[in-house]
Image: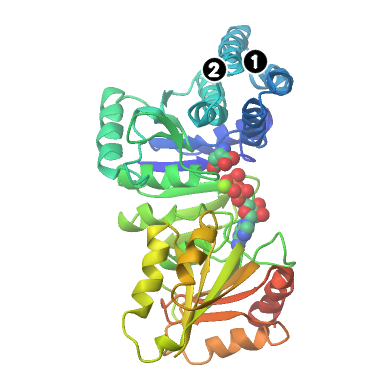
């Protein structure tokens, strides 16, 4: 069985939904299809939640009405028969009444979690009804029945495997199983989600749970490009990546993949293909265990980074200093991305600044602390084993005109990271593309 995931743009209009249905039915293999919300819907639902937090039900209701009108129009464009138009209208009425019911009572993060997940409920029901109208053997598997996180907010792999298998066993005779990306329950059974862009993660978790033959991530671009196409011109798709390279790129900002979505596929050794719904014949990118030796593959950038430097004369020849520094970050549940050390100090970079002031107060007990905000990690990814002579020189050479705050190399065989000021991001990405790929 394979898994096919379609992102927001891919299901963004009734016509796109029809194209998706064509792609789903281009072979007769049994498949689980993971859908995102139609593009714009999740943002709109977050906006509605924001109005409700601010105790503005009028603003929320205006947005709900606009959304409902748009969806009712989709019914006319998507379905052919009166019977299915009516079924879809009834479903939408019930759905929007449900969303509206949240404008009346108290509004907390529990209600928010329910509201922002309705986009996936809408898209999956609409596509399932369309498949059924067209006579395809399709059914809906509700993600809230099997997708769950544990007390550490990590996916509960065993639970997902068991519950999904039970659901498939109960509904054995379908060719197409549609399910929602993004939404899940937490360890206490409450509705939750896998964070923005989390439908990729859903697909990877499902693919790993059923040991799928492959996981296809269908989106609006022909695979992972060698640089961020939103900032750099002339980027090219990369035909293959190994799991580690793809993980690094996703974690360090390649938006095409959710930061943690490669892990489940990697552990289950299920290949992931990145494909373009608008150009289905393009080869895209295959992510697997295979490594192309001695090649720099791609560049990505992660924004909103804060660099912290701690210097202490006491560090000179002192053991245990780094442990004390790292323990402070652990206490405040803040993960560190980059680390560089010298004899008298250490610099680290973090992206979560929620507890920054407490962290800084603790660090000041160990030495002199300096902070640089608004930084950006530029990450060069490929087979960068240290025996492959010259790659780090090539990357540094590309950045020779740009001030660099930190460099990290040797942490893995797949990554060289440079920390630069946010204002230099675009220039740095373009310089790397020119030097590494275009020359
Ligand atoms: P979906 O809604 O299908 O999940 P996303 O918008 O999340 O799609 O991801 C696709 C987008 O990722 C592309 O349109 C592109 O702008 C952006 N992107 C950023 N970095 C890369 C990259 N290295 N390769 C391809 N796309 C990238
Ligand atoms: N709909 C969700 C979002 O917009 C999840 C996803 O698209 O992957 O973040
Ligand atoms: Mg996405």
Residue 418: give x, y in percent of width and height.
Answer: 58, 77
Query: Residue visible at 29% across and 44% down?
Result: 157
Quadrant (top left/top right/bottom left/bottom right) for the N terminus: top left
Mark 1 to mark 2: distance in Å? 8 Å
Q: Is residue 2 above or below residue 72?
A: below
Residue 393: give x, y in percent of width and height.
Answer: 57, 90
Image check: 112 left or right of 151?
right
* Whether residue 373 is visible: yes
Query: Residue visible at 66% across and 78% down?
Result: 432
Query: Residue visible at 30% across and 29% down?
Result: 168
Query: Residue visible at 53% across and 86% down?
Result: 391
Quadrant (top left/top right/bottom left/bottom right) for the C terminus: bottom right
Mark 2, Cα crowd under 10 Å, few <14 / some 14-19 / many 20+, is some
Q: Quadrant of residue 44?
A: top right
Residue 310: give x, y in percent of width and height.
Answer: 50, 78
Q: Which mark is residue 80?
A: 1
For label 2, the residue is 133
* Whether residue 221 is visible: no
Tag 1 and tag 2, C-beta contact below 8 Å: yes
């Amino acid at each position: 069985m394979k898994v096919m995931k379609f992102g927001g743009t891919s299901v963004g209009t009734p016509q796109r939904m029809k194209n998706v249905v064509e792609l789903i039915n281009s072979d007769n293999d049994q498949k689980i299809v993971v859908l995102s919300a139609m593009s714009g819907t999740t943002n709109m639902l977050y906006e509605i939640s924001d109005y409700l937090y601010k105790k503005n039900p009028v603003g929320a209701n205006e947005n709900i009405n606009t959304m409902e009108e748009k969806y009712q129009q989709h019914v006319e464009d998507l379905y052919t028969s009166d019977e299915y138009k009516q079924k879809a209208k009834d479903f939408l009425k019930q759905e929007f009444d449900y969303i509206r019911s949240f404008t009346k009572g108290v509004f907390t993060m529990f209600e928010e979690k329910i509201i922002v997940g309705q986009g996936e409920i809408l898209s999956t029901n609409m596509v399932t009804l369309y498949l059924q109208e067209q006579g395809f053997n399709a059914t809906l598997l509700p993600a809230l029945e099997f997708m769950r996180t544990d007390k550490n907010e990590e996916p509960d792999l065993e639970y997902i495997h068991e519950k999904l298998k039970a659901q498939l066993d109960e509904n054995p005779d379908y060719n197409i199983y549609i399910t929602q990306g993004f939404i899940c329950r937490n360890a206490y059974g409450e509705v939750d989600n896998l964070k923005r862009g989390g439908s990729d993660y859903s697909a990877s978790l499902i693919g790993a749970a059923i040991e799928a033959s492959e996981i296809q991530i269908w989106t609006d671009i022909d695979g992972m490009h060698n640089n961020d196409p939103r900032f750099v011109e002339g980027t090219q798709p990369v035909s293959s990546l190994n799991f580690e390279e793809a993980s690094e790129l996703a974690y360090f900002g390649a938006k095409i993949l959710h930061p943690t979505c490669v892990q489940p596929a990697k552990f289950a050794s299920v290949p992931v293909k990145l494909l373009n719904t608008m150009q289905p014949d393009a080869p895209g990118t295959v992510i697997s265990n295979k490594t192309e030796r001695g090649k720099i593959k791609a560049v990505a950038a992660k924004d909103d980074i804060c660099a912290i430097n701690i210097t202490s004369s006491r560090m000179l020849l002192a053991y245990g200093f780094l442990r004390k520094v790292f323990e402070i970050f652990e206490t405040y549940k803040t993960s560190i991305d980059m680390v560089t050390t010298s004899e008298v100090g250490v610099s680290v970079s973090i992206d979560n600044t929620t507890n920054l002031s407490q962290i800084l107060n603790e660090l000041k007990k160990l030495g002199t602390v300096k902070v640089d905000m608004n930084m950006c990690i530029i990450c060069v990814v490929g087979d960068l084993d240290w025996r492959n002579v010259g790659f780090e020189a090539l990357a540094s050479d590309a950045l020779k005109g740009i001030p660099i705050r930190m460099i990290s190399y040797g942490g893995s065989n797949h990554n060289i990271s440079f920390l630069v000021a946010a204002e230099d991001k675009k220039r740095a990405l373009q310089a790397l593309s020119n030097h590494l790929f275009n020359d």
